[in-house]
Amino acid sequence: MSVAADERHGDRGGRGILSTYGRDGLIQIVLIANSVIMLFPVVIMVFSGFKTNMEIFQAPFRIPDFTDIGNFVTMATQTNFLRYLLNSLLVTGTALLATGILGIMAAYALARYTFAGASFILLFFMSGLMLPLKLAVIPLFILFRDLGILDSYWALIAIYTAMGLPSTVFILTGFIRTLPSELEDAARMDGASEARILWQIMLPLCRPALVIAGIYNLVPIWNDFFFPLVFIQTDALKTLPQGLTTFIGEYSTDYGAMFAGLTLAAAPITLLYIALSRQFINGMTSGAVK
Amino acid sequence: MSRLTLRQVRKSFKQTEVLRGIDLEIAPGELIVFVGPSGCGKSTLLRCIAGLEEITGGDIALGDRSLAGVAPSRRGMAMVFQSYALYPHMDVRGNMAFGLKLMGLSSDEVEARIAEAARMLQLTPLLDRKPRELSGGQRQRVAIGRALVRQPEVFLLDEPLSNLDAALRSEVRLEIAKLHETIGGTTIYVTHDQVEAMTLATRIVVMRDGRIEQVGTPRELFETPANTFVGTFIGSPRMALLKARAEGGRFGIEGSGDVALPDAPGGARALTLGVRPDAFEVVPEGQGWGADVVYTEYLGTDAFLYARLGDGTLLSVRTDPAAPEHATGSRIALRPRAGGLHYFDQDTGHRLAA
């Protein structure tokens, strides 16, 4: 072996662990620290769901006895929790469905047809991304009062649909524009009507983009506290975020039960997110790289 | 089977006129190729015939029936797209069945037609695959199959081979020719590749700038091009266009001397001579136009030399590959073979009768 090779070999040995693994290692440490910080409140929330008030204050970080599901039973049997959960599912589900259906119809028209005012309509949708809906809460209140849908599911569904449409139209319009228009021509030659092209050809192709738009809107809608607070009075119509506040009493609060409720409230969305994350990532890249 | 008639077909996109009055008669069973440089309107014309674009003037008729306002699917036509445009979320069977179901055929009939087309195109083992699981050539066959099952009167093919690699291209080209022979439907084929045009066409339609330059069989176009554009577009390497002045039966080119051309049209003063590479012969100095050799190419069965005339015109000459090559930069003399010349009007570019 030549001297030069020996030197090089020795050189590599002299660089040490830090210089060999330094950059990647540092990134790993930062990422792990970030994960810990992000997960910490979630873990504490889950832990506290299995503890009594006393345990929470005495040993907040201790790993609880996971077989003790008393708090969850309390939640399910002695409160309106299931009702709230159902309301949240109903309102969020309906709003997302409406957002998807209306959004893809609008996006298809905006992406494919040339008509007077198309760019204005697109801009109009886009303006919804920039203006917070909360600014309009008083006019909305008056409007809903006159429509007679105050204190009903419809008030929330209408608002959430309106809230979700701008981003959905934005994402879908961009996505549809990347799809080859020869597909639609082929379907036209095959005798498909415009509606059939949308539902049978474009809709399946837009699924990744729809999932992105859905997830993007799901979290804010599911977690929304403001609009139910303003528009819903009847206890049986309350959604989860609003409903859970009823457990915070003026003099005493059952923290254990509340954390159990929060855990249950966060569970569906977390599970859905994990289930759809592959599609989510696919969708993100498929729009960028055709 | 009926004849397809185009009368003064015009198409504009906003201010831009893409088709400027197309007149064409296509007989039943013909394989017509639209050829021309990109942007000449050939694909637009095809889409107009398909009904995917609305024409802004003129009329398209199939038999006695005008197609104005007739939906694409009701024109008795089927189209194969450049990108194949297969529905990505349906398998091969679904792709072919989609249109048939919309035609309202019974599921037995749909199955029978798909089986028949799959057999013809060797797609039977692939029927349950998705397009993304197929190779380029297989996708192409599915696209053809999807057109086939509709049993149309007219097949429209929009640059169907341009996405295939060279080896596959000639294979599929042959397949298309065979299919046309077996099925016998009228076929309109758009391409920018003159080899595809020459090998496939019953008649070729050469287009430029939204107009038809010439319609004819491959042989007619090659042997009697109507103008300098068709002359240079068909044939490879290109036909050379020489600007010559006639004086007393001799045709002079600036800086290259003059040559006697006995079969030239009479009375012409200045005209453009079209000479294909194989119509030149290298002759001893003084008997032809003088030219400088720029470059030589040896291709085995062929050899070409590129030379520049005194007025700067670059031309290609097919030479005997067995003969010794001419050195780059050497001076040679060139003369067109008798009967190998095309005469064009220098101003209009139109062919002059010999």
Image (spheres, rainbow, N blue to C red):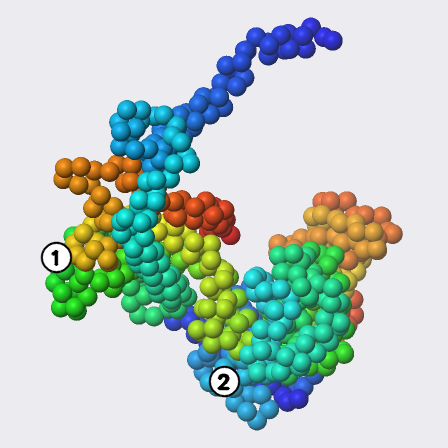
Q: Which quarter shows the N terminus of chain B?
A: bottom right
Amino acid at circle 1:
Ile
- Label disc, if present, on residue B70 of the rendered structure: 2
Disc 1 sits on a residue from what chain? A
Q: Position of residue A225 (x, y in %)?
A: 23, 48
- Label disc, if present, on residue A215 of the rendered structure: none
Q: Position of residue B11 (x, y in %)?
A: 46, 76
Q: Position of residue B239 (x, y in %)?
A: 68, 64
Element type where label 1 sits in the image: helix
For the point 68% across and 10% down, which residue is it?
Answer: A5
> Which residue is disc 1 drawn over?
A138
Amino acid at circle 2:
Val
Element type where label 2 sits in the image: loop
Count of numbered circles on the image = 2
Residue B216 quadrant: bottom right
For the point 71% across and 52% down, which residue is it?
Answer: B306
For the point 25% across and 62% down, which residue is it?
Answer: A153
For the point 60% across and 78% down, which residue is it?
Answer: B100
Residue B90 quadrant: bottom right
Residue A26 quadrant: top left
* Farthest-out residue, right: B322
Q: Horizontal placement of A26 versus B159: left or right?
A: left
Residue B343 shows in this picture: no
Instruction: Give neighbour class at mark 1: few <14, some 14-19, many 20+ (Cα, 10 Å).
Output: few
Q: Horizontal placement of B274 versus A207: left or right?
A: right
